[in-house]
Image (cartoon, coloured by chain):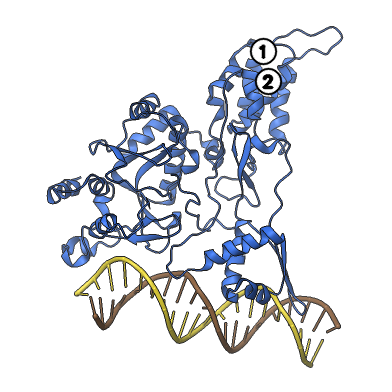
Chain colours: A blue, B yellow, C brown
Amino acid sequence: MTQIVAIDQSFTSLTKPEAFFSLLYGAYMIERPKRFRSKLSASNNNDRQWVFVGGKERMKSLASKATLFAVLSDPEVETTYYTPNGYYRRDLRWTESLRWLNAFVFDLDIIGETIVEVLERFDNAGLPRPTSIIKTPSGGYHATYVFSKPVRATTKAIRLYTAIMGHMAVDLGSDTAAVGANRIFRTPTEQNLIYFEPSNCYDFEVFKTWRDINHPYEPDNAGFFNIHTGNIMNHPALQYLLESPCQEGRREQTALTLALAMKASDWPQERAEAALRDWFISCCSKGAQAGKKPFTQRDAVYKAGYVFRSPKFHAPKADVIRELSGLPFFYQTRNCWESAKPRSDRERSHLFEWEADLLALLKTEKELSGTQQELATRLNCPLTSFKAILCRLRADGRVIVETRRGRGGLTVVRLPEPPLNEPASDNVIVFPLAEATPSVPIRDAEIIHADFQLKRVTRIDRLPAAEVSEPEAPDPEPPD
DNA sequence: GTAACGATACGGCATCGGTG
DNA sequence: CACCGATGCCGTATCGTTAC
């Protein structure tokens, strides 16, 4: 904090955005290029951070406030987006290269709400008031919590940060796709920064405490998949199903839906069975029409075992929950590893153009075959670069590549088939379940991103068939 | 064995923002 | 403004694999 105070004193004429960035990066960003700085901090290179500012496609890396402010005030330079967190490398904007977690930023796509209503969301979620709010061109808001003390971005810290942010996003009703440590957001400007309270900075511990109270941590559920699903059992619609009288004719479906929701919420099977037993005893109609088999407690509990045993069940259908409960219900999946695409931001890079060219070509031709040299020539791309993009696209699961070596060798490239394995996959979360240990990435799993209000799949990602150390991509689509 | 291909390793070069 | 250090791009050489 002492450093921040010092900054405030030395820059009395900061603009609001500059003050924001000073606060955000203050503790661990050098003031000016090295020649102006004290020897003490200059030698401490392990703490410095690089941050990125620029457009969606290309961002500049910056390490000093003087440079940052210069870039921000230069109308020639695109500065639409920035990274709230800092990196130890200036050339790789990967989660793995993060050094400091400086803030949480939430993308609130709530058009028409006033700033007062936005602040009420924070109050209602039991969260403190944010440090800043900016208005985005689409009419939404980006709200930021600047940490009073940046958190070193260790693997564990990033995982905790993401998990807590996921809970906060759900409770705030913000875009869960914007959850993660390696995200870019709209750069605050004099015009869009409509709320800025520099004193509203909080220690990361504040958010850990909030999470412990509002979303108790269960070691069994500590895997990645909590983040995909959230705990949907906490949703009022499912609470309603669990606690309200259930009539004949709906018992089967309600029991199944509850079991699915429990599975999707990572409940242990025993807990699900116990809950369904309680549900049967206190809520479920016990009658049966003449000649029909009665619905028994055993049937209810059996549903849990059935659902938990079978890998083909993943999560309940949102529209069934809406129908059974009569309450609005939707949920959105998100991927805690974004579709892996290490997007570095290099001036000379043509790889992404070729990558886009290849994908565009595949959309029209469905399948490309030939020697790699032929295909590379066709794309007007060097052979080595063609191999690089092929390797990356294959690792991401965005194309299927078959190669035949030797004489008459051939490379066939095509787009992966959309998954058809689940009925009504529009609201099914495919998440590989209990058999996978949380620390190991799941191979060949697909994540369906669905908008359950519009009832459509928005995107399908295949988790990269790669090692844990595979760099995580920065966000493919920054929010407005 | 040989031709023709894919896979891999290596080195020259360009480029970046920072440095002094 | 020349230089630094790190890194990506890309051509080339070489090795491995396969059909003939």
Disc 1 crowd, CA 10 A, few/some/many (<14, 14-19, 20+)? many
Judged left or right of residue B5, residue A144 is left
Disc 2 crowd, CA 10 A, few/some/many (<14, 14-19, 20+)? many
Q: Amino acid at mark 2?
A: Thr
Element on which disc 2 rests: helix
Element on which disc 1 rests: loop
Cα distance in 3D space between marks 1 and 2: 8 Å
Res C16 quadrant in image: bottom right
Q: Position of residue A119 (x, y in %)?
A: 34, 28
Q: Amino acid at mark 1?
A: Cys
Chain under callout 1: A
The image shows residue A480, relative to residue C12, as above or below, that is above
Both on one chain, marks 1 and 2? yes
Q: Position of residue A23 (x, y in %)?
A: 25, 46
The residue that mark 1 highlights is A246
Q: Image point 29% across, 43% down: which residue?
A: A191
Choose between A417 and A200: the one closer to the eye: A417
Res A258 quadrant in image: top right
The residue that mark 2 highlights is A254
The image shows residue A20, relative to residue A346, as above or below, that is above
Judged left or right of residue A147, residue A419 is right
Q: Position of residue A138 (x, y in %)?
A: 43, 40
Q: Position of residue B20 (x, y in %)?
A: 19, 74
Chain under callout 2: A
Would you say the residues marked 1 and 2 are in contact, meaning their CB atoms lie under 8 Å apart? yes
Choose between A348 and A45: the one closer to the eye: A348
Residue A394 appears in view: no
In the drawing, what numbered circle is on residue A224?
Answer: none
Q: Quadrant of the C terminus of chain A?
A: top left
